[in-house]
Image (cartoon, rainbow, N blue to C red):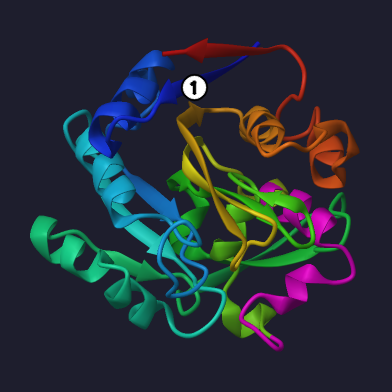
């Protein structure tokens, strides 16, 4: 049984804390090592195209009070430079306030991993810092032009360093021939350990523009397939018709036997 907390949005600190409490997140947080908060910072557009810095701050405050592990914020943007995106969206100021590290995963030192069971990415260049870290995927709930939705799982495209996967944009090689299969493969190498989804205001129609849709929720859970199943349903899609979810079902989590905790 996969637990997914669905909490009415009041403000980020209150609602995110409530959602994480409902799934007993403190019991799963490591007490040593590294925790990576991984927002969706695909470019320098404001939320809901990207993850609000206030959401990242709320997750950081929650974790900092409950673990002695090092906590960083990391991403590799999809266009432009991650350093500029951090600065434009307020993440540099956040880091200065709390003296925490911001890591550009597009430029990070990498290791090469192989998996013959992958659909497309039989080899994957992973930032070394990500491999053994506890990763918290912190996306916005959005539609996507290729995969119907981009939520907890596709957010992991940000760990793929742009210097290996860039074409016309920083991650373009992950989108061909099948974006859905690349989502499954990237999560085969590293899936989120915990996901917190900002569904306060979602983005309908297109992941880089689209229409704002007020949903007024925060989602949280450990099973990224369950999270994306619930999130996709909120956006009006049938998860059973979404290839990245059906391919991930039973591999990265479950589309069935989901217990929703409403608050």
Which SS class for mark 1?
Answer: strand
Count of residue discs: 1
- Location of residue 169 with respect to 194 vertically, above or below: below
Whether residue 62 is situated above or below residue 167 in the rendered picture:
above
The residue carrying mark 1 is: 6
Q: Is residue 106 above or below residue 212?
A: below
x and y, in percent, of residue 237 in the image: 78, 38
Residue 127: give x, y in percent of width and height: 51, 66
Magenta span covers which residues?
Answer: 167-187
| Image-quadrant location for residue 246 | top right
Give the x, y percent position of residue 32. Answer: 28, 38
Mark 1, other Cα within 10 Å: few <14 / some 14–19 / many ≥20: many
Asked whether 212 or 121 is in front, the reply is: 212
Which quadrant of the figure has residue 11?
A: top left
Say whether residue 35 is left or right of residue 199.
left
Residue at x-position 53% and y-position 28%: 222
Residue at position x 12%, y 55% in the image: 98
Residue 14, how many percent across, how many down? 25, 28
Quarter in which the C terminus is drawn:
top left
Whether the magenta-drawn stretch holds residue 24 is answered as no
Q: Residue at x 61, y 44 (%)?
A: 191
Q: Main secondary structure of the magenta part?
A: helix
Closest to the observer, 148 or 175: 148
User: Position of 134 compared to 148: left or right?
Assistant: left
Decide whether residue 170 is among the magenta residues: yes
């Amino acid at each position: 049984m996969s637990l997914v907390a669905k909490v009415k949005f009041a403000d980020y600190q209150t609602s995110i804390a409530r959602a994480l409490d409902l799934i007993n997140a403190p019991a799963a947080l490591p007490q040593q090592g590294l925790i990576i908060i991984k927002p969706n910072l695909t470019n320098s557009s404001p939320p809901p195209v990207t993850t609000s810095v206030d959401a990242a701050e709320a997750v950081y405050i929650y974790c900092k009070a409950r673990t002695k592990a090092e906590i960083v914020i990391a991403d590799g943007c999809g266009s432009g430079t991650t350093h500029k995106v951090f600065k434009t969206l307020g993440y540099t100021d956040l880091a200065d306030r709390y003296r925490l590290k911001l890591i550009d995963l597009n430029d990070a030192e990498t290791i090469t991993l192989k998996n013959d069971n992958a659909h497309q990415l039989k080899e994957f260049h992973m930032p070394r810092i990500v491999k053994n870290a506890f990763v918290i995927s912190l996306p916005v709930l959005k539609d996507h032009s290729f995969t119907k939705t981009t939520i907890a799982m596709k957010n992991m495209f940000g760990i793929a360093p742009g210097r290996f996967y860039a074409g016309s944009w920083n991650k373009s090689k992950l989108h061909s021939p099948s974006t859905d299969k690349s989502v499954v493969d990237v999560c085969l190498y590293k899936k989120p350990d915990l996901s917190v989804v900002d569904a306060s205001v979602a983005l309908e129609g297109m992941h880089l523009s689209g229409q704002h849709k007020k949903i007024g929720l925060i989602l949280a859970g450990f099973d990224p397939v369950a999270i994306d199943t619930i999130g996709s349903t909120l956006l009006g899609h049938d998860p059973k018709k979404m290839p990245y979810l059906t391919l991930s079902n039973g591999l990265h989590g479950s589309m069935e036997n989901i217990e929703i905790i409403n608050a």
